[in-house]
Image (spheres, helix red, strand yellow):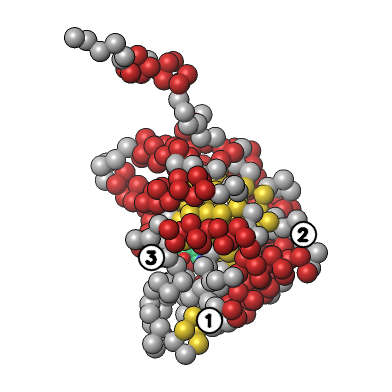
Amino acid sequence: MYPLKRNRRLRTNESIRDLVRETIISPKDFLVPLFVTEGKGIKEEIASMPDYYRLSLDYLGAEVKELWNMGLHAVLLFVKVPENLKDNKGTEALNDDGLMQRAIKTVKDACPGMLVMTDVAMDPYSSFGHDGIVENGQILNDETSEFLAEMSVSHALAGADFVAPSDMMDGRILSIREALEDEGLINTGIMSYSAKYASAFYGPFRDALDSAPVDVKNVPKDKKTYQMDYANRFEALKETEMDIDEGADIVMVKPGLCYLDIVREIRNEVDVPVAVYQVSGEYAMVKAAAEKGWLDHDAVVMEQLTAMKRAGANIIASYFAKDAVRLLG
Ligand code: PBG
């Protein structure tokens, strides 16, 4: 007895495999995270993120032009804030001439078509490395949400197309939406980090921005009172549905690879675009293993990115975006 149905027929050669491939990634799928720093002529490699850099504003313009010409048309901006400008309330984040605000303008001047999304969170500005105001051993929720709303307005006025709150305070999407509407910023979108887990994969990012939580009396040195427990699945759906009800235009799952079950679940349940963030630790793992010759860098990158799209992600934030474009040819 031989099998009548032979699945291998569809795998015989490259041409038939190309014809029946179900998931195809394209440069249009990517959101490129960029790290911006003060100064001039600075392009510093991040120690735990080989081949990824912090750029000063003069380099930022050239970088976004290059991305644009490669077909990468959306960036997500992060800033490294000088230590002397940090405080518990993140005051510098509201400076209309602050680094983020100048970075937004730099990108738009260099490349008017580039879609600019900005990280809205307090941690790069916080002397404690937290995503909220710290008081009496607590990370204050409502005060922080109000602050994030002001920060969002400042980014939008500087020219951001979308604000991307990455903090996980309750109710912040509503605060932000209302603040934007009050200012007449009706076309500024919100991409919510709606299912963001308390993950050990953010380590290299915190190195990049020097934003890791520090020792504070009676405050846990982690983000587990606001970011989600990685053991939970239903909670991700609840968080995401609430953010959509509050006005999120795009929702996000973060990190990526370990959370593709969540991406699929959310993709099946909601009717807004779903983004996934392949985070810094995921990038670092691939780089480290490839450096040792233990993994094929390019092959692993394409496999992971394709898996993210197959899981249901409509948008992929990734430090490998340029590699992906190179590999797509
Ligand atoms: C902070 C923020 C983090 C990341 C994006 N925004 C780190 C954190 O929550 O501590 C992580 C991104 C990455 O690891 O690539 N609000």
User: Which residue is located at x 44 percent, y 41 percent?
Assistant: 311
Instruction: Locate residue 224: give its quadrant.
Output: bottom left
Instruction: Locate residue 148: give its quadrant.
Output: bottom right
Disc 3 and disc 2: Cα gap in Å?
Answer: 34 Å
Checking the image for residue 81, the label placed there is none
Q: Is residue 260 visible?
A: yes
Q: Are marks 2 and 1 in contact (CB under 8 Å)?
A: no
Disc 2 and disc 1: Cα gap in Å?
Answer: 28 Å
User: Which residue is located at x 72 percent, y 45 percent?
Assistant: 113
Task: Identify residue for label 2.
Answer: 186
Position of residue 93 measured from the top left corner of the image (x, y, whole percent): 63, 73
Nearer-N-terminus badge (2/1): 1
Q: Position of 6 compared to 177: left or right?
A: left
Position of residue 18 measured from the top left corner of the image (x, y, whole percent): 45, 21
Residue type marked 1: Leu
Which quadrant of the figure contains the N terminus? Answer: top left
Dot 1 alpha-carbon crowd within 10 angstroms: few under 14, some 14 to 19, many 20 or more: some
Task: Identify residue for label 3.
Answer: 229
Task: Identify residue for label 1.
Answer: 140
Question: Please, what secondary structure does the residue beneath circle 2 have?
Answer: loop
